[in-house]
Image (cartoon, coloured by chain):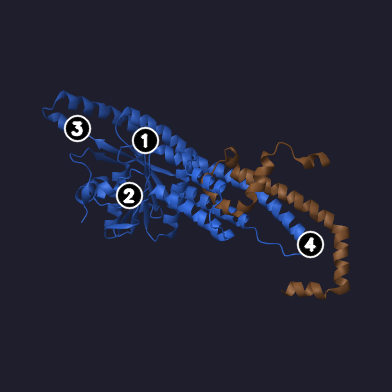
Amino acid sequence: MEKKNKKKTGGIIGFMRDFTYGMATHGMARHALKTRSSMEHLFILITMGDMLGIPILPPYYSLRLLPHVVPQITTWKRRMLREKDFMDSMY
Amino acid sequence: MSLADFFKRYPNRRYIMYGGKGGLGKTTFSAATAYYLAKKGKRVLVFSVDPQASLSDIFEQDIFGKGNVTIIENLLACEVDADRRIQDYQEEIRQRIISMYGMKKIPEEIESYIKASSAEPAMEESAIFDAVVDIVVKGDFDYYIYDLVPLGHALYYLSMASIYDAWLEKITKLREQMREYDKAIATMKREESQEDEIYNELMYIKDRIGRSSKIMTDTEKTAFFFVLTPEEMTIVDTEKAAQLFAKYNVPLSGYLVNRVLDRELLKDNIPLYLKNRIEMQSRALDMINQKFGSSVLSTVPEFDSEIKGLDVIRNLAEVMFEEKLP
């Protein structure tokens, strides 16, 4: 709640702050987020790879990690099993 | 040195393990050692993770999957039901997923992954050694006597633990890198970065694996004894196994020879079959002496009855420790 109020009362300063963020760091943040999500997928591959038929060594403990990656499993599978990433052609 | 001397001289060795080929008397020796130490006033837990556990048979009491059961004063016994433990663990994971995301049902692909995991190699070993950590961490016993399943099992786990370790090292590093990115993103967006629960899980796993392999390799607290019988093949196998265990830094503390026939019998008029066996055994005993010499802590004769029930266990303990018990 408090955060929201701050944003509202930010007025011109808040606008300036958001503006500079948009100009300067938004691209960087986006890039960082993208890298971060690739890493996330790599991480799931290493820990849950046997879901795709890649044998992974310790099943007992990797099961502990499973709850934490449940929401990402579907996108991860799609990404891993896709033959070619259409984003590849953009770079 | 005798077996009794060993326990006197090394009171800090609280994790006692008997290893050896199947059927040589590991469980009976575990039971007798537990009995002896309990009679000496120590609080002792003897436990087994063998699915065909025989502590129940030896103590003539059904203890399988029933937690710590009191046998006599100071002596408790426990047989871990590994299958049930795996099932409970899987259920716990399901519940965690359901409560974390407020789901009604586990998504199918996740469910099939959980189901398939119980068929994975090493699942059982990991579950067993994890159970052992639980037992040892929460207990308040003076001695833990671990009735190992045949040799391969323990070796397999130890080698696995070192692979686990390397694996964890790698993914922890990756996770730390990801954490750096999280922090950077949070700063850029001027948000609070959140704690990484996966990282915490990894730390937990690392700790558990460290503890479980430490139980078997702790040079100050663990004593590992090999049980063998006077037969050439067993001796050769035991020697090989001992070398492997030494490679994984298991503190080998001595050898116990079981099922030795009494040479006195030769004076009587005995059948040729028995005579030949006694002579075979004396050749094997020479070999044992040559290979293991003073590391042989106790020599136990072949009993004329099955080792079952507390009376026979007491007899066995008295012979093993060369001491009369009350």
**Can residue B219 be seen here?**
no
Q: Chain of mark 3?
A: B
Q: 10 Å neighbourhood of mark 3: few (<14), some, or many (≥20)?
A: few
In the image, is residue B146 above or below residue B190?
above
Please identify the residue farthest to the front as the structure is shown. B104
The tint chain B carries is blue
Q: Chain of mark 2?
A: B
Q: Position of residue B160 (x, y in %)?
A: 51, 41
Q: Nearer the viewer, mark 2 or mark 3?
A: 3
Is B257 or B208 nearer to us in this picture? B208
The N terminus of chain A: image quadrant: bottom right
Q: CA distance from mark 4 to mark 2?
A: 68 Å
Residue designated by label 4: B189
Q: Chain of mark 4?
A: B
Residue designated by label 1: B292
Residue designated by label 3: B263
The letter of the brown chain is A
Residue designated by label 2: B5
Q: Are marks 2 and 3 in contact (CB under 8 Å)?
A: no
Q: CA distance from mark 4 to mark 1?
A: 68 Å
Earlier in the chain: of badge 2 and badge 1, it is 2
Q: Nearer the viewer, mark 4 or mark 1?
A: 4
Q: 10 Å neighbourhood of mark 2: few (<14), some, or many (≥20)?
A: few
Which secondary structure, mark 3? helix
Q: Tag 3: residue type? A: Arg
Q: CA distance from mark 2 to mark 3?
A: 26 Å
Q: CA distance from mark 4 to mark 3?
A: 85 Å
Earlier in the chain: of badge 4 and badge 1, it is 4
